[in-house]
Image (tube, rainbow, N blue to C red):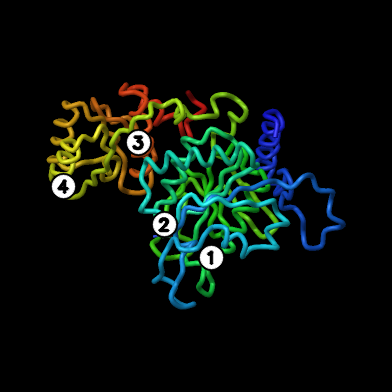
Amino acid sequence: MHQLARASTVLIVLIAVVLGLGVGVGVGVGGTAGAHAAPEPERGPEPQVAVIGTGGTIAGVAKSRVSFQNYESGQLPVSRLVDDLRPEVNRLADVRTRQFGNKDSNDYSVPEYRRLTAAVDDALRTNDAVVVTTGTDTMEEFAYWLDLTVRSDKPVVLTGAMRPWTVIGSDGPANLYNAIHLAASGRTTCFGTVVMLNDQIQAARDVRKADALRLDAFTSGSSGELGVVDQNHIRLDRAPARVRECGKPGWQTPFDLDRLARRPLPKVEIAYSYQGAGPEAVKAFADAGAAGIVTAGTGAGGLSPAMTEARADAVKDGVLFASASRTGSGAVYDPDVRGVVGAQDLTPQKARLLLTLSLAKTHNEDRIQRWFTTLGPERLVR
Ligand code: ASP
């Protein structure tokens, strides 16, 4: 779609959101066709959607049809998952698949994340949208990484499942179908990466897995979900702040992986604070060569005295810290401590990804603090 057309699409989405209209304005099948609709309006060319498989429970196989929680994840090829949804999915889009990997989400590394970004951008050169299937355990990290690194503003939708594909009542087929529907609709153009599970659409920056087993495991906390997929209807109630920069150069983040040096990305670790936490974790990470450490602090970034001292020592050795909260909600603003940036409302695991990418570009603390502040809800007050 032309940049200008895309920008106006988003503008219409925003106006529709403000007016509370659940209208479909996307390309191809927008999701407005009701069960009693008059003759179908003429359709344009089919949207092309690439589904990239990385594994997880959605591709999992269980020993019996009622083995909901004991199963092998990352077994079925993504082509089989999509084929199981045909012919219905063919009415949404021209869907092709690509197997990136097939394993548990916990088994992926940052170098593989780098290759995933390249795979997504590559697919977006010839497709209108991409769906990525992943395990749910670290899906929020997959999503935020892609949100920070994919250069294209076409829709990127992540999905997975809490129950393996082969059991009774698996959420996998409906999640994948809805994700393809959402991607094909074009409605999240310029939203960056979104996550679609349990009919809910969530922003990559806000979403987190908040339950180990339930089907409604994902939440965006006080930010709230972006919208829902209700059968034929895609309802968007809000959009991520970056939509306002749709079509402008500022829409992309500063983290163009093609322009970062080919050398490995810096090592960034997470240290968790708790009552009486010792200095060992911080010291060990610094000794192991960490360029950055995120602290999952109590409340608004609190650390035990021993950890505070270990942090000060590591700062003297050039380690940069991001102070996050272990509470799962609220923000750590400017800690006013040399060598420590405030992670804002990012969870520690997402702050780690942003700190990794930031340190790959610069060690300038002020610049990095600015990225933490502006690559989010405060994007517009730069
Ligand atoms: N352990 C699985 C994974 O993250 C869990 C899931 O997919 O739901 O790959």
Q: Which residue does the numbered mark 1 point to in the structure image? A: 171
Q: Which amino acid, mark 3? A: Ala
Asked if the residue at label 1 sits under 8 Å from ligand 1, the reply is no
Which is more foreground, mark 1 or mark 2? 2
Q: Identify the residue at image location x=39%, y=40%.
A: 345
Comes first in the chain, label 2 or label 4: 2
Q: Residue furthest right?
A: 39
- Dot 3 falls on a residue whose secondary structure is loop
What whole-number distance in Å separates the C-alpha atoms at marks 2 and 4? 34 Å
The residue at which mark 4 appears reads as 277
Q: Name the residue tied to disc 3.
A: 343
In the picture, residue 334 is in which quadrant? top left
Q: Label 2: which residue?
A: 103
SS class of the residue under badge 1?
Answer: loop
Q: Position of residue 200 (x, y in %)?
A: 56, 55
Front position in the image: 235 or 198: 198
Whichever of callouts 2 and 3 sits on the residue coming sooner in the sequence is 2
Q: Is residue 254 above or below residue 267?
A: above
Answer with the quarter of the image where residue 359 lies.
top left
In the image, what residue type sits under mark 1? Answer: Asp
